[in-house]
Amino acid sequence: MNYLLLLLDHPPVIIHAEDRRAYYNALEQFDSDQKLDSLVDFLKSQTVKTWQARFERGRNRT
């Protein structure tokens, strides 16, 4: 997934260990009903979480 994101000039997304079960649930939901809503919502939240953490680390260095 991150490879494709980077190819399309989007930032990578980290699936955090504590959110892995929610990720699997979103994938299973797609498998069962072929709707992307849960997976898209999950990936949006992980993108925010990924970049908030990076932003905070950068702010703490200055």
Image (cartoon, rainbow, N blue to C red):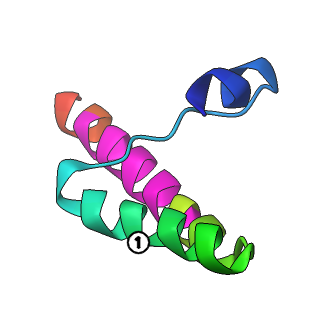
Q: Residue at x 44, y 46 (%)?
A: 51
Q: Image height check: is 44 above or below 8?
A: below
Magenta highlight on residue 45: yes
Q: Quadrant of residue 10?
A: top right
Task: Find the residue positioned furthest to the front.
Answer: 32
**Residue 49 location (% of width, % of height):** 38, 57
Residue 40 lies, with reference to residue 15, above or below; the image says below
Horizontal and vertical percent position of residue 19: 27, 62
Q: Does residue 32 sit above or below 24 in this rendering?
A: below
The residue that disc 1 covers is 25
- Extent of the magenta region: 44-57
Please name the amino acid that badge 1 sits on. Asn
Relative to 1, is 47 on the left or the right?
Answer: left
Residue 44 occupies quadrant: bottom right
Residue 15 lies within the magenta run? no
Magenta portion: prevailing SS class: helix
Crowd band around label 1 with a 10 angstrom C-alpha radius: few (<14), some (14–19), many (20+): some
Please state, as top left, top right, bottom left or bottom right, where the N terminus lies in the image: top right
Count of marks overlaid on the render = 1
Nearest to the observer: residue 57 or residue 49: 49
Q: Is residue 47 left or right of residue 52?
A: right
* Residue 59, x across and y down, in percent: 28, 39
Q: Secondary structure at mark 1?
A: helix
Q: Residue at x 55, y 32 (%)?
A: 12
As drawn, is 14 to the left or to the right of 4?
A: left
User: The C terminus is located in which quarter?
Assistant: top left
Residue 42's x, y, as percent? 50, 68
The residue at the point 71 percent across, 70 percent down is 36
Residue at (78, 25) in percent of width and height: 9
